[in-house]
Image (cartoon, rainbow, N blue to C red):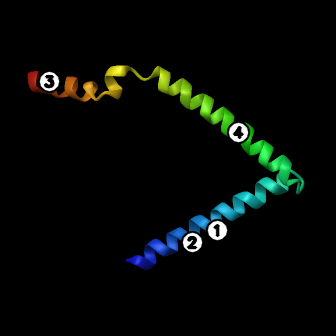
Amino acid sequence: MPTAVAGSASDIVLELEASVDLIIAQCEGDARAAVRALIVANHFLERDLERLRASVSTGYVRGRFGGLLSRGEALA
């Protein structure tokens, strides 16, 4: 079983390295441009995450939504 985990970890590393090479190639070999592009992409992802967090109800986050479902199921 440990070999399966190691195999998947090496696949992840290879995929990561391929992604790094692709990003640098898309930036015409300019590492600074690649880092800048990643920072901009990360900024957009963080902004989306903040928007999603704001749209999730407080009751759901606290686990109250699950409690309401179980009460509803008990009545059915």
Q: Which of marks 4 and 2 is nearer the N terminus?
A: 2
Q: Earlier in the sequence, mark 2 or mark 3?
A: 2
Q: What element carries label 2?
A: helix
CB under 8 Å between discs 2 and 1: yes
Q: Earlier in the sequence, mark 4 or mark 1?
A: 1
Left or right, 30 with reference to 44: right
Residue 69: quarter of image: top left
Residue type of the residue flagged with mark 3 = Arg
Residue type of the residue flagged with mark 2 = Ser
Task: Tell me the CA gap for discs 4 and 2.
Answer: 26 Å
Residue 67: quarter of image: top left
- Could you say which disc has been placed on residue 30 in the image? none
The residue positioned 36% from the left and 21% from the top of the image is 58
Residue type of the residue flagged with mark 1 = Leu
Q: Earlier in the sequence, mark 1 or mark 3?
A: 1
In the rendered image, which residue does mark 3 sit on?
71
Task: Tell me the CA gap for discs 4 and 3.
Answer: 42 Å
Task: Tell me the CA gap for discs 1 and 3.
Answer: 48 Å
Task: Tell me the CA gap for discs 4 and 1.
Answer: 22 Å
In the rendered image, which residue does mark 1 sit on?
14
In the rendered image, which residue does mark 4 sit on?
41
CB under 8 Å between discs 4 and 1: no
Question: Is residue 3 placed above or below 66 in the rendered structure?
Answer: below
In the rendered image, which residue does mark 2 sit on?
10
